[in-house]
Image (cartoon, rainbow, N blue to C red):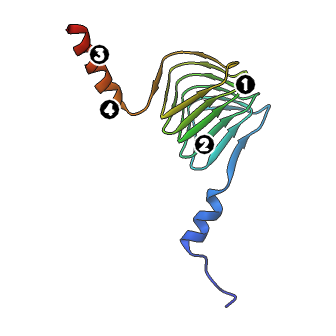
Amino acid sequence: MFNKEKTPTQTERSSGSSATLISPGTLLQGDVSSDSDLRIDGTINGNVTSASKVIIGDTGVVEGNVSGLQADINGKVIGNISTKELLQLRGQCNVQGNISAGKLQVEPTAIFNGMCQMGSVGNIVQMSSNETQADSK
């Protein structure tokens, strides 16, 4: 009764709700990888990868590539961003690099310099071949 062991499902639920925070004034040199949400308010010189959501706050800076399930960018990214689902470019964010996302939301005050690819690769290839056929007629 009192010696009840935790099942793997209970352990996974408790660890899945946590988030990693890189606070302002923190400088990390190297790649960062996380299975949970990741919030960056400091500076990372390296690639950032998350199996969940990446949040870059107003004071956050990433000099490297960012990839995750979703991303919410408020700070600065010098590198490519790749998300499987929603990518949000908010406020005064500054992105210098290419982006690839399932869906993209850009606020009017955001700065983005690079190329953008949205949706699945199959749709893009199909659209390109249709444009080629239309141009040759």
Q: Residues within 10 Å of mark 2 (few under 14, many from 20)?
A: many
Q: Between disc 3 and disc 4, whose residue precedes?
A: 4
**Quadrant occupied by the C terminus:** top left
Label 4, on which residue? 122
- Residue 123: percent from left, percent from top: 34, 30
Q: Secondary structure at mark 3?
A: helix
Task: Name the amino acid type tagged 3.
Answer: Glu
Q: Is residue 107 left or right of residue 126?
A: right
**Quadrant occupied by the N terminus:** bottom right
Q: Which tag is nearer the camera, tag 3 or tag 4?
A: 3
Label 2, on which residue? 53
Q: Which tag is nearer the camera, tag 3 or tag 1?
A: 3
Q: Between disc 4 and disc 2, whose residue precedes?
A: 2
Label 1, on which residue? 91
- Residue 8: percent from left, percent from top: 54, 71
Q: Between disc 3 and disc 2, whose residue precedes?
A: 2
Task: Name the amino acid type tagged 1.
Answer: Gly
Q: Spatial distance from mark 3 to mark 2, Cα to Cα? A: 35 Å
Q: Between disc 4 and disc 1, whose residue precedes?
A: 1
Q: Spatial distance from mark 4 to mark 2, Cα to Cα? A: 25 Å
Q: Which tag is nearer the camera, tag 2 or tag 1?
A: 1
Q: Is residue 122 left or right of residue 87?
A: left
Asked if the residue at tag 2 contacts the one at tag 4, i.e. Cβ–Cβ closer than 8 Å, the answer is no
Q: Spatial distance from mark 4 to mark 1, Cα to Cα? A: 32 Å
Q: Residues within 10 Å of mark 1 (few under 14, many from 20)?
A: some
Residue 131 numbered tag: 3
Vertically, is 111 above or below 90? above
Q: Spatial distance from mark 3 to mark 4, Cα to Cα? A: 14 Å
- Residue 36: percent from left, percent from top: 61, 49
Q: Secondary structure at mark 1?
A: loop
